[in-house]
Image (cartoon, rainbow, N blue to C red):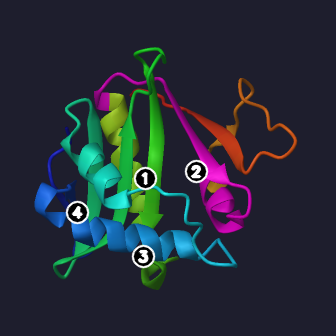
Amino acid sequence: MISDRVTEGRVIRTVLPAEVEDVVALHARARATYYPDGLPQDGTDWRAAWQSAIARPDGHVLCVVKEGRIIGLASFRTPEGAAADTVKLFQFHVDPDHWRSGVGTALHTACVEEWKADGKRTAVLDVHVDNRRAQAFYTRLGWLPDPENPPAEGDHHLFLRLRVTGE
C-alpha cells in the first residue's frame, strides 16, 4: 500500500473504518450530480457496502483529505474471477465543491502508483452513461473503451480499460 502523501495541503491515505459516514455522504453528493431525477432507490445499503469495501483485506479504499475533511474517494480491488494482474476501480468520487481543482487527478495518480506497486497490468471500470464529466476525465487520463465489454443496447454503464505500465 502506498504511504500517506501530502500534496498541496491535501493528504491521500487509506480510509479508516470510523470514517464510513463521511464516505457515504460524499458518495451520495457526487452520485447525485449525474442523476437528474435524484438518486435511484435500488435498495442498496451504501453504509454496509462501504463498510465492507473498507474492511476487505483484498481491497483498497483511498481518500483525499483537506482540512480534516474527506473530499475524494477511490475503491479498487481485483474483481472475482479476473486475472491477478487486473484491478477494477469500483468507486471514484470527488466532492463536487472540489471539481476541477486537481483532487481527482492526484487521487487517480495515487491509484495508478498503487496498481503498479501491486503488479497490476490492466485496470477496468464502468461509468454511468449520463456521467459525461467522468467520461471526459477518464479519457484525459488514458482510459479507453474496453474491447472485452462493448456496450449493449440498454446498458446504463460504459466499460473502460487502462493499461497500467510499470517503470
Mark 2 or mark 3, whichever is nearer to me: 3
- Mark 1 crowdedness (10 Å alpha carbons): few <14, some 14-19, many ≥20: some
Which residue corresponds to mark 3?
95
The residue identified by callout 4 is 20
Looking at the rendered image, the disc whose residue lies closer to the viewer, 1 or 4, is 4
In primary-sequence order, the first of circles 2 and 3 is: 3
Q: Amino acid at mark 4?
A: Val
Contact, mark 4 vs mark 3 (Cβ under 8 Å):
no
Give the residue pinned by disc 2: 141
Could you tell me how far apart the alpha carbons at marks 3 and 1 are, in whole angstroms? 14 Å
Q: Are marks 1 and 2 in contact (CB under 8 Å)?
A: yes
Give the CA distance from mark 1 to mark 2.
Answer: 9 Å
Query: Which badge, 4 or 3, comes first in the chain's sequence?
Result: 4
Q: Indicate which disc, 3 or 1, sits on the residue closer to the N terminus.
A: 3
Q: Residues within 10 Å of mark 3 (few under 14, many from 20)?
A: many
Tell me how far mark 4 sits from mark 3, CA to CA.
15 Å
Quarter of the image with the N terminus is top left
Q: Which residue is mark 1?
A: 108
Distance CA(mark 2)–CA(mark 3): 19 Å
Q: Going by the picture, which residue comes out furthest to the front?
A: 43
